[in-house]
Image (spheres, helix red, strand yellow):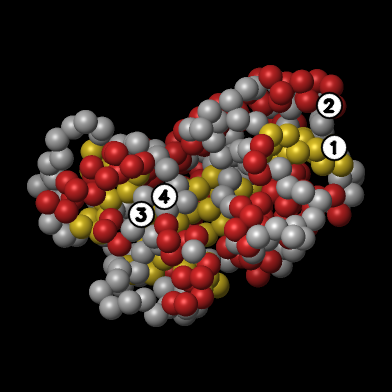
Amino acid sequence: MRRLRVLLLTHPDLIPPDSLKGLSEQEVHALKTEYDVVSTLRASGHEVRPLGVTSELRPIREAVETWKPHVVFNLLEEFHGEAVYDQNVASYLELLRVPYTGCNPRGLVLARGKDLSKKLVHYHRVPTPAFAVFPMRRKVKRPARLALPLIVKSLNEDASMGIAQASVVETDEALAERVEYIHERIGTAAIAEQYIEGRELYVGVLGNERRRILPIWELSFGDLPPGTRPIATEKLKHDVAYQERRGVIEGPAKDLAPHVVERIQTLVKRICRTLELDGYARIDFRLSATNVPYFIEANPNPEIAQAEEFARSAAHGGLKYPDLLNRILALGMARAKVVGVDV
């Protein structure tokens, strides 16, 4: 790929230093994605300029007009402190007619709400858990059709925010308590869905119209304490010491029958088409004991630090990290050509 001017958007606190030397483990963990992306793209010969963005769009426009980047690498996960506003930044980049990486705003909107995405893909014959949504400031009453146990989550937040062992509820009283917790602590509506006992699978995908499915990845829960449910809690996902202590690992899914792999790959493509996902995304499934892959959620613009599952899955499939990032750049620029942006 030719040398590009790359404007990288992130939160101001996450603009990476030239070196991680001297930083604490916690600081390194917080900066890992931005540092990996910036340092790798620069090593590939690109000119990269990070820009911190929080609540003003003007700095983006000024940078685009004065520096004229070939492409924007969008690592923003929120705007104005709200995760649901991420699609507005992508929309703004489209209005500026500048190529950008990651998912388009329509896909971000469709994937953000766990209820809407499930309704859409279920219509297209993708297995989904039964669920109900509990809006803010409404009485919690479980529909008769929705059998216990259930797992209660934020309707809009990702990265396992608000998920703990208490999220799996087996009584109506526990359901009401956990919904109230989501309302008060996370500040969003809650979704309660059928708890699927089974394997936790993640499937990365690259592409716009034609999509490359990465090797199926699995979160293995290791030696959990007695009575602990095998779910991706916030602690399990982000506490490295806990992962090491309990033997929680991620890696290629093993012992999947060929017809199950083919089924999952077919569903991933169907989900991406239905939710209009492009660029790069990760689709999460729970595989039941009867080998039914239940769609849990779609994650456009997932974590792409080199040590995280998306990049590791790509590497396992033969796509090295610098090649992965260059492919993401190329996909953003290719989409811009389709809509008539001069790149």
Tell me the CA gap for discs 3 and 2.
42 Å
Q: Earlier in the sequence, mark 2 or mark 1?
A: 1
Q: Are marks 2 and 4 in contact (CB under 8 Å)?
A: no
Q: Are marks 4 and 3 in contact (CB under 8 Å)?
A: yes
Q: Earlier in the sequence, mark 2 or mark 4?
A: 2
Tell me the CA gap for discs 4 and 3.
6 Å
Q: Earlier in the sequence, mark 3 or mark 2?
A: 2
Q: Are marks 2 and 1 in contact (CB under 8 Å)?
A: yes
Q: Is residue 167 left or right of residue 28?
A: left
Which residue bears the numbered disc 3? 163
Q: Secondary structure at mark 3?
A: loop
Q: Earlier in the sequence, mark 4 or mark 1?
A: 1
The type of residue carrying mark 2 is Lys
Find residue 106 and report its horizontal and vertical position in percent: 52, 31
Find residue 241 and report its horizontal and vertical position in percent: 51, 70
Find residue 156 and report its horizontal and vertical position in percent: 40, 40
Mark 3 Cα-neighbour bin, 10 Å: few <14, some 14–19, many ≥20: many
Tell me the CA gap for discs 2 and 4.
37 Å
**Residue drawn at x 87%, y 42% as measured from the top left:** 47
Q: Would you place residue 252 above or below residue 310 in this image? A: below
Q: Is residue 287 left or right of residue 314?
A: left
Pick the front one: 112 or 19: 19
